[in-house]
Amino acid sequence: MPEFIDVHRGMTGITPEVLKEVNQANRAIQDEEGVNFKQAWADPESGLVWCLSEAPNAEAVKRIHERAGSPTEEVYSVPVQV
Amino acid sequence: MPEFIDVHRGMTGITPEVLKEVNQANRAIQDEEGVNFKQAWADPESGLVWCLSEAPNAEAVKRIHERAGSPTEEVYSVPVQV
């Protein structure tokens, strides 16, 4: 399954509780698009958040994020990994 | 140990071999700054690369990347994770 990294901005001050809630909202519906959110990392200072997922394609990741209330246009395929 | 995500740009067309070489160059000297590069993901289309590391601080990550020939100013602390 292809993997993707998506980027969210403007989450300055994000707490572990908020990231957990956002993640749970995405995971609650991810099966409907065949997406599997694997990990997420957040920097409260810059407000940047990165999610790592497996999905059939980038559009599926975008749709889940949008429906779960955390939309982003920045979804990148990451076929090259170490 | 704090964790960091750093971002590299302009790596359009990056291959698994190139990412492996860059990663090895960083790992070869990482102990000198107490850094541990854990994973890296690359999107050959956008030219974006993300590295996940453990390190004492962001400056240590920057110094290793600079000395290894893959400098970046974009090193973010990621204390919030799911």
Image: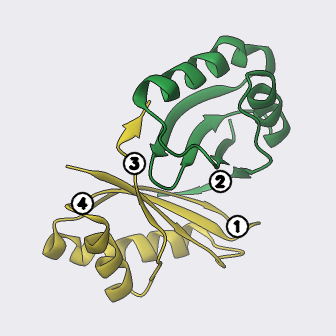
Chain colours: A yellow, B green
Q: What residue does disc 2 label? A: B79
Q: Nearer the viewer, residue A36 or B63?
A: B63
Residue at disc 4, secondary structure: loop
Q: What residue does disc 3 label? A: A78
Q: What residue does disc 1 label? A: A44
Circles 1 and 2: CB atoms closer than 8 Å: yes
Residue at disc 1, secondary structure: loop
Label 1 amino acid? Pro
Q: Residue at x 59, y 24 (%)?
A: B22
Circles 1 and 4 on the same chain: yes
Which quadrant of the figure has residue A58? bottom left
The answer to whether A78 is drawn above or below residue A57 in the figure is: above
Q: CA distance from mark 4 to mark 2?
A: 26 Å
Q: Residues within 10 Å of mark 2 (few under 14, many from 20)?
A: some
Where is residue A4? Give x, y as percent: 37, 56
Q: CA distance from mark 1 to mark 2?
A: 8 Å
Chain ID at mark 3: A
